[in-house]
Image: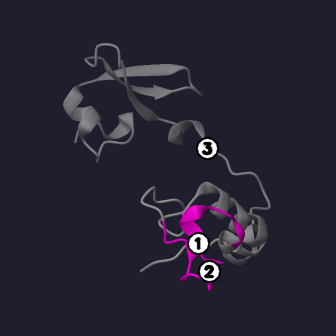
């Protein structure tokens, strides 16, 4: 059984956290939620936020803090989009260049085609 990793989960006073038998009752940590908070590590957003408040800086420092802004250049800024109102018009869009290139639905669904440069696949 997987339990919530929230560092204060056992302190919240809810009926589903009450454990034990008559005369020996206590509040305990919940089991994880079926809502899949924090990739199945927390029972609620509240517990996830508690954990992040205490551990986010340490985790970011461990995995690598960003010290310079990241950039996406014009040639890498293409993304696929379709007109959801009728679902028939599919496009490659680049907001940086102000371009919109029509493509077929098959090209839209093809995971190998990620830029207009490889439309010939």
Q: Secondary structure at mark 1?
A: strand
C-alpha span from label 1 to label 3: 50 Å
Residue named by callout 3: 72
Residue 83 within the segment the image draws in magenta: no
Q: Neighbour class for label 3 at 10 Å: few (<14), some, many (≥20)?
A: few
77 relative to 10, above or below: above
Q: Residue at x 28, y 48 (%)?
A: 112
Q: Nearer the viewer, residue 74 or 90?
A: 90
Mark toward the start of the polypeptide (1 vs 3): 1
Most common SS among magenta residues = loop
Q: Position of residue 120 (x, y in %)?
A: 24, 37
C-alpha span from label 2 to label 1: 7 Å
Magenta range is 11-32
Quadrant for the N terminus in the image: bottom left
Left or right: 25 with respect to 55?
A: left
Left or right: 11 with respect to 104?
A: right
Q: Secondary structure at mark 2?
A: loop
Residue 84 found in image quarter? top left
Callout 2 touching callout 1 (CB < 8 Å) = yes
Mark toward the start of the polypeptide (2 vs 1): 1
Residue named by callout 1: 18
Q: Nearer the viewer, residue 22 or 25?
A: 22
Residue named by callout 2: 25
């Amino acid at each position: 059984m997987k339990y919530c990793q929230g560092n204060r989960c056992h302190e919240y006073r809810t009926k589903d956290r009450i454990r034990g038998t008559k005369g020996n009752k206590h509040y305990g940590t919940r089991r994880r939620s079926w809502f899949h908070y924090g990739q199945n590590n927390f029972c609620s957003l509240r517990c996830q936020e508690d954990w992040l408040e205490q551990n986010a800086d340490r985790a970011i420092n461990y995995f690598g803090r960003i010290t310079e802004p990241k950039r996406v250049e014009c040639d890498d800024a293409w993304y696929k989009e379709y007109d959801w109102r009728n679902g028939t018009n599919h496009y490659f869009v680049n907001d940086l260049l102000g371009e919109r290139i029509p493509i077929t639905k098959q090209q839209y669904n093809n995971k190998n085609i990620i830029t207009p440069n490889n439309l010939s696949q």
